[in-house]
Amino acid sequence: MLSGSLFSLCLLALVAHSHAGLSWGKCPSAKDAVKTFEPTKYVGFWYQLEATSQVWQFGGKCPTANYTLEDTGRVHVKNSMKVFGKEVAQEGYAELVGEPGEAKLNVVFEVPLFGHREASYFVVDTDYENFSVVYSCSSIGPMKAEFGYILGRKPTLDESLKEKVDAAVARSGLRRGAFQKNAQKC
Ligand SMILES: *[C@@H]1O[C@H](CO)[C@@H](O)[C@H](O)[C@H]1NC(C)=O
Ligand SMILES: *[C@@H]1O[C@H](CO)[C@@H](O)[C@H](O)[C@H]1NC(C)=O
């Protein structure tokens, strides 16, 4: 089994290699996020339409997310993708961590072998019914890896949402050009 620090080094190398947003410093908590967030409207099934480069989905296709409310108030997270045509899923949970009403969550995954993995999950903008723009950040020792996701309720993003999505990405501080489309054809 890999030790934590060796794993971090490997992750660092992988993340650097994938040109993801790796930089020095802590993950920011003062980022733009929806201020009147309604988790009950947000849960359900989302297609991951675009994302900045990321190691977790290496070799994977058609990533999706299914969020459900747990009795505890936590949100159950199930991320799925197809690897060589087979569905591979990872499950975890998310908890609200911001000021009341703020769409700032912390997502926790218990990954076999690699152990505990945590990331912030800030909803920068969503209309609940069509799109969501998410800023996410993971700490790796003295560094942070920043990611962005554009989620949609349908497998393609309606052209009419382009302006809203672009504006949200700009507010997140992520580069729009860093996003890559995931063809949702599996
Ligand atoms: C999402 O998860 C819920 C609860 O487990 C399940 O009932 C539903 O079928 C899932 N949706 C999809 C599209 O997989
Ligand atoms: C989602 O998109 C549909 C189709 O464009 C639109 O009718 C609906 O109003 C949108 N929902 C919200 C909450 O904006």
Image (tube, grey):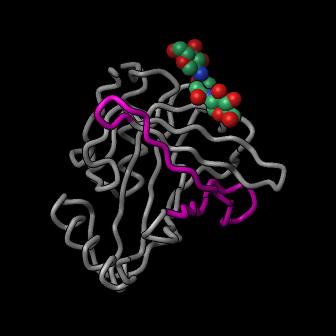
Left or right of 168? Residue 78 is right
The percent coordinates of residue 38 (x first, y second) are: 72, 43
The tally of labels here is: 0
* Residue 35 is a magenta residue: no
The percent coordinates of residue 135 (x first, y second) are: 44, 54
Where is the N terminus found, in terms of image quarters?
Answer: bottom left
Q: Quadrant of ligand 2?
A: top right
Residue 137 lies in what quarter of the image? bottom left
Residue 70 can be seen in this image: yes
Which range is magenta?
A: 82-111
Q: Residue at x 25, y 40 (%)?
A: 180
Residue 69 lies in what quarter of the image? top right
The percent coordinates of residue 97 (x first, y second) are: 66, 66
Residue 44 can be seen in this image: no
Q: Residue at x 34, y 85 (%)?
A: 5
Residue closest to the eye, 12 or 124: 12
Residue closest to the eye, 82 or 131: 82
